Amino acid sequence: MSPLRPPIKPMHRRALLRGGGAVIGLPLLEAMVPAREPEAPKRLVYMYVPNGVNIGAWFTPQPANTAVDPSDETLNLGASLEPLLPYKKQISLLSGLTLDKARANGDGPGDHARASAAFLTCVQPLKADGAVQLGISADQVAAAHMGAATPFPLITVGGEAPRSSGQCDSGYACAYSSHLSWRSATQPAAKETDPARLFDRLFRGGANAVTMAERRERARRRRSLLDYVREDAGKLQSTLGSNDRQTLDRYLTAVRELELQLAALEKEDVTEVPNHLRPKEAPANRFARLRVFNDLLVLALATDRTRVATFLTANEGSNHAYSELGIQQGHHGLSHHGSDPTKMAAIAKIDKANAGILAHLLGGLSDYQEPGGSLLDHAAVVYGSGIASGNRHKHHDLPILLCGQLGGILQPGRHVQSPKNTPLANLHLHLLRSLGVPVKSHGDSTGVLDRV
């Protein structure tokens, strides 16, 4: 983000040149036009929680036998979502969305692997003894369109280390459960699970940490070398045949594009992030570590290091025992609660803690002000799971929250009820188009979820 500069006072449109007794009217100059605040960019963030939720605690309990009125958009957040109450006006609860490609559809068990694999791709994952075949995820589609404007087209982070080889769920590859973001049908995007490494990558040039001045100097030297390359290549033009000249022209075009990228890096004018913001080490407490990741994501978005981020808070099917919450039984085991009240209460407690992590992210985005509002005003944050209830692996009526306003496109503060079995892909498609991505469909979409 560029440092603040004092505003330039615009010249009056009737300004005159006076000299030698003559008075000459000036033409319309740019300096006469009042400067406008630059338009803040739009951002997209996906945050995923595994194993489904205690769906009954997401909503305020309704009287028995009460008919659902789709026109009623009153937003009532249940006990599990209480941490989000301060941001209620920035949140919409979406009901009726379905992730059909997380269903078996003839492939038998493996719902956890399918849930995370299909959440952003909306494609049926291949079940073939550890082989991988999926599709491109929505975050990657957005990054491909928006990424040229930032040093990092997409940031992917995770609360648990990935398992990228072998089988993790009934014949499905571990990559499905460990990754949310997919660059291609066979390549998941690597996720960062260490906050300090993420900080160095974003703000210090990677493992070999360098200052902004050093990065600019490296870019300047590389650009000087390209000047020599272009000069020598130009001397060859007159000695080559037609085909070779075309080949050389393509090469020089690539060199010119690289020159422009290096020039942009050399002139890069982002806020230097001080060393005291670098995490010392990953906190042992699960939720403390997730909050550190939130802080880094907000910092990356605020300094325009990226505009798209994906956060897998824990691997799908994770059996982490949340001793931080006084819960000793594993999360996955608890999710198959069999209507046991004690287990259901534990799941609701985990859900509430996860909602607190989302609230922390929304708070950071809300606190950072930029032209036209806050980061949250210009962002869309999608939070939820590819499983509604882990007890029976339901993939319809998913627990999905949509936060932010995306520059005025979204109208939060509502409970938006969609018809039964509306594809989750319709939400992704709407967000992609709202970001200016010229895409006709995504996964199993049947249209756009434009009521949000």
Image (cartoon, rainbow, N blue to C red):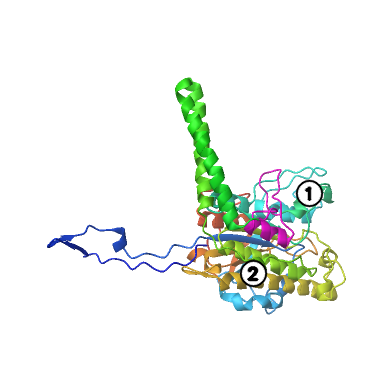
Task: In this rendered view, identify the residue nearer to me: 353 or 371.
Answer: 371
Kindly identify which residue carries mark 2.
361
Direction front: furthest residue: 20
Of the residues shown, which amino acid type is indicated by label 1?
Answer: Ser
Label 2, label 1: how many angstroms apart (C-alpha)? 28 Å
Q: Relative to the observer, which residue lies in front, 170 or 163?
A: 163
Quadrant location of the C terminus in the rendered image: bottom right
Give SS at disc 2: helix
Q: In x, y percent, where is residue 219?
A: 56, 48
Question: Residue 223's spot in the image, x, y percent?
Answer: 53, 43
Question: Left or right of 429: which side holds 24?
Answer: left
Taking the image as shown, residue 302 lies to the left or right of residue 112, namely left
Q: Which residues are magenta?
A: 180-209
Q: How many marks?
A: 2
Percent x, y of residue 134? 70, 45
- Rendered view: 116 above or below 80: above
| Mark drawn on residue 380 | none
Q: Identify the image quadrant of residue 305.
A: bottom right
Identify which residue is drawn at 67% across, 62% down.
Answer: 47
- Asked if the magenta segment contains residue 202, the reply would be yes
Q: Which residue is mark 1?
A: 164
**Any part of residue 414 in sight:** no
User: Picture coordinates of residue 113 (x, y %)?
Assistant: 77, 53
Magenta segment includes 65: no
Mark 1 nearby-residue class (10 Å; few <14, some 14–19, many ≥20):
some
The amino acid pointed to by label 2 is Leu
